[in-house]
Amino acid sequence: MRGSWRSKLTSSLFVLPYFVCFALFLLYPLASGIVLSFQDYDMLGSREFIGLENYKNIFTPGTLIHDLFVRGLSGTFKFVIYSVPFLVIVGLALALLVNALSNRVQGFYRTIFFMPYAISATVMATIWMRVFDTDTGFLNILLDKMGKTGPHIGWLNDTPWVWIALVFCTIWWTVGFNMIIFINGLNEVPEELYEAARLDGANAWHRLIHITLPSIRSISTVVLIMTIIASFNVFAQPFLMTRGGPGYETTVLLMNIFAVAYGQHQGGAASAMAIVLGLIMMVVSTVIYRLLSGRRG
Amino acid sequence: MRTKINRLLLILLATAIGVMFIVPLIWMVTISLKSDIEAFLPDLSFIPKEPTLINYIEALKGGDLDVPIIRWIFNSLIVSTVGTVLVLTIDALAAYGLARLDVPFRKALLSMFLSTMMIPGIVWFVPQYILFQDLGLIGTYGAFFLPATAGVFGVFLLYQFFLGYPVEIEEAAYMDGANKWQIFVRMFLPASKSILWTLAVITFMGIFNDYIWPYYVSGGNEDMLTLTAGIAVMTHGSYVNYPNKLMALSVIATLPILIVFLLAQKSIVKGIIHSGIK
């Protein structure tokens, strides 16, 4: 009975509901997004094929689309460069710390470090805007009480503080995710390796450099690439906390893609911008993956 | 002796970092218990001088600033629950089919589903919005939860779980005359309760916490916002000068999700690890 024409038909019925949802809500938008990027669409009804015009505009200095794209991409790039090293290294450091604790308290501290991950972007932003507020924020009052004099720091209004603030609250919000993956990686390092190193008289630092880090190499690559992709998708922190300011300093590309689609009513240009961003992300993550996994070890 | 001191130092370090993780959350609760004036005083004590529940009462009653928060809570719970049930049902069926049944083009379907995981969501965000506009679903509940049903994550998670199920028991059931549907319902579903729970928690939290999509597909109708999207609007809207009211709203929005998180932490970790490593 299995493998027959009839069996194949009934088996397909199991996959059918998901396939329909997938095709309708993901595959179709994906395809129509590509088509849209070659069109001029006012987000209401009138469409017109304009060939590569949208892409040309992105790469032609002086056009509005070019300005919005470049400005946004530069903000996104800065966020990626500033945030990724910290998100990966702090994630690993917390994982090492939790793993070094005794079994009885491990779960408690892991939960504490992971908890902010459950909080929504909007609540995260609401909390941290209160912490970073220039006049009445927690941080500046704390600095006052600790004896700092002079004007308050504009954590959300001045460079470079604004990047420090955005990166800091991003670490608080999402580093637990990386920590969890690192903890799992650390637990899979064979205990015998450490035993052997101890017999050879290696100290904790040597064990970290020569055993732990090489053993979690591949998992670190995965964490790095996932973090890069997540940071390229940055939106909530600057959109809610700085509105892209001061000036255009923290205006990221996702904000400008939404601005082009819903503010300028240029669906086609927004789609082209999104596709170029998608391609950049795929190229960057592929290159980094090749570089890291190409090496020996 | 030295290891004991080391242990102690490690605990102290972990506690110091832990305090940094907890303080912002406590601060949220502290401000939510302050009056309009006290909220702006330069006072760092975690217990307000005159604690008050007025912000919660006003938020829930509507108060002087008209915010349909009860409606938002209702919206959030409805779309998260319906979305989660739909995703679980659809994904479990598909994953079972792909993992255990003779579905034609099985390999091709799998790699098609998986390859979309590499594409960032922003690429289909605007066209997806246009699709819902064309379908006339902007400002309806459907627009909130239907996109979740296309997600690949759940299918992949359950697929991997179903693959590991021993084939002998399944064969024996076929010999006894059971059909595919019966085997799915009587054997696979009961055996995969924990992974289904994992998917349910992750899906529920994802829909509940999302705000960009609900913000746009609410179609500018304030009654059709979710709680999470509503807070984003309030941050720069009529609550902009009332951090205490904003924090009360935030506590209300965070409490249910934090409870789910703490209860289901093991399941969430399991889900992350399954999705992260492979």
Image (cartoon, helix red, strand yellow):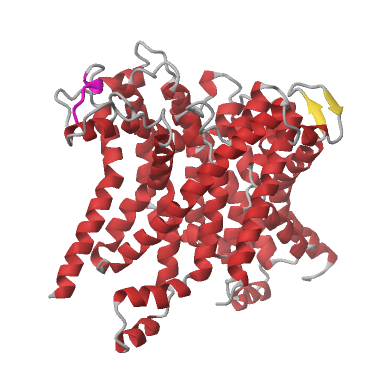
Name the residue located 40 percent from the left edge and 71 percent from the top edge. A187
Q: Is residue B186 above or below residue A175?
A: below
- Whether residue B266 sits left or right of residue A278 in the image: it is left
Q: Which residue lies most toward the front here? A: A150
Residue A214 x/y as whole percent = 47, 74
- Determine the image quadrant of residue A102: bottom left
Residue B227 visible in the shown view: no
Q: Quadrant of the N terminus of chain A?
A: bottom right
Residue at the location (20% across, 31% down)? A144
Looking at the image, residue A245 sits to the left or right of residue A52; the answer is: left
Question: Viewer-proximal residue, A5 or B63?
Answer: B63
Residue A34 placed where, x, y %?
A: 78, 40
Residue A48 lies in magenta, yes or no?
Answer: no
Residue at x-position 17% and y-position 64%: B8
Q: Is residue B116 left or right of residue A46?
A: left
Q: Nearer the viewer, residue B31 or B203?
A: B31
